[in-house]
């Protein structure tokens, strides 16, 4: 059962990212502040839910949250600063976009960087432990999936609507056959594979 808070009587924002291990597309992050006692019966770690349930929850979270925000880092930023730094930067950007300033941040994972005098707690597998982090995981995932679906309309031969930029066999075969696009992360080397 997901916990409602880490510190009682403090305004907490849960933060998570999506797309860290992809070969293409930005990394997205979300920050979510949920009101006390909010009811979201289907809420769970986004990886455990179907796409249809995630979309349903996205609507509910955006309606019921005290505040929420989504941000991203581009492929070029990922190439320049690396994916770990960009995952953290995207979460920081999401927090900065919140319309309510939280007292404390709950960060999914074990790494973050101090900024703007925020206190924070890193929580491994936090998206399966705390409601606000689970909500952030769903917003980050669904907003990124929408981006990749739209990208698939521009580049239909890469199957982004199905692979969402992850390194599936068909996606890798498309890269081998057609080459890299601007949206691909060139620093994510594919072992033993020659790219035109």
Image (cartoon, rainbow, N blue to C red):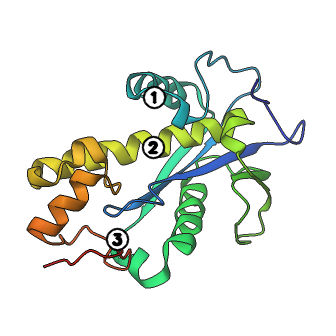
Badge 2 local density, few (<14 within 10 Å), some, or many (20+)?
A: many
**Residue that appears at 31% across and 62% down:** 24
The C terminus, quarter of image: bottom left
Q: State the mark number for residue 54.
A: 1
Against 182, residue 168 (above or below) is above
- Quarter of the rendering containing residue 73: bottom left
Residue wearing tag 2: 141
Q: Position of residue 109 (x, y in %)?
A: 69, 56
Against 142, residue 97 (above or below) is below
- Quarter of the rendering containing residue 26: bottom left
* Callouts 1 and 2 close, C-beta under 8 Å: yes
Disc 2 is placed on an element classified as: helix
Q: Position of residue 48 (x, y in %)?
A: 54, 31
Lower position in the chain sequence, tag 1 or tag 3: 1
What residue occupies the far front of the structure in this picture? Answer: 192
Q: Is residue 186 left or right of residue 45?
A: left
How far is the residue under mark 1 from the one under mark 3? 25 Å
**Residue that appears at 48% across and 50% down:** 70
- Quarter of the rendering containing residue 64: top right
Against 143, residue 60 (above or below) is above
Of 159 and 31, the residue lying toward us? 159
**Residue that appears at 66% across and 40% down:** 127
What residue occupies the far bottom of the structure in this picture? Answer: 80
Q: Is residue 31 left or right of residue 2?
A: left
Disc 3 is placed on an element classified as: helix
* Callouts 1 and 3 close, C-beta under 8 Å: no
Total count of labels: 3
Residue wearing tag 3: 75
Lower position in the chain sequence, tag 2 or tag 3: 3
How far is the residue under mark 1 from the one under mark 2? 8 Å
Q: Position of residue 41 (x, y in %)?
A: 62, 15
């Amino acid at each position: 059962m997901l916990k409602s808070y880490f510190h009682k009587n403090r305004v907490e924002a849960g933060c998570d990212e999506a797309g860290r291990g992809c070969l293409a597309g930005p990394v997205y992050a979300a920050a979510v502040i949920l009101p006390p006692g909010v009811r979201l019966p289907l809420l769970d770690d986004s990886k455990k839910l179907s796409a249809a349930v995630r979309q349903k929850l996205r609507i509910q979270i955006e309606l019921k949250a005290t505040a929420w925000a989504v941000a991203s880092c581009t492929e070029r930023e990922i190439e320049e600063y690396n994916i770990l730094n960009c995952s953290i930067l995207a979460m920081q950007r999401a927090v900065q976009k919140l319309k309510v300033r939280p007292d404390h941040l709950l960060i999914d994972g074990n790494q973050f960087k101090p900024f703007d005098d925020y206190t924070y707690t890193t929580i491994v597998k936090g998206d399966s432990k705390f409601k606000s982090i689970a909500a952030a995981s769903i917003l980050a995932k669904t907003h990124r999936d929408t981006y990749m679906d739209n990208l698939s309309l521009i580049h239909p031969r890469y199957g982004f609507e199905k692979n969402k930029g992850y390194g599936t066999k068909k996606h890798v075969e498309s890269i081998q056959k057609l080459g890299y696009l601007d949206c691909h992360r060139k620093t994510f080397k594919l072992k033993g594979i020659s790219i035109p």
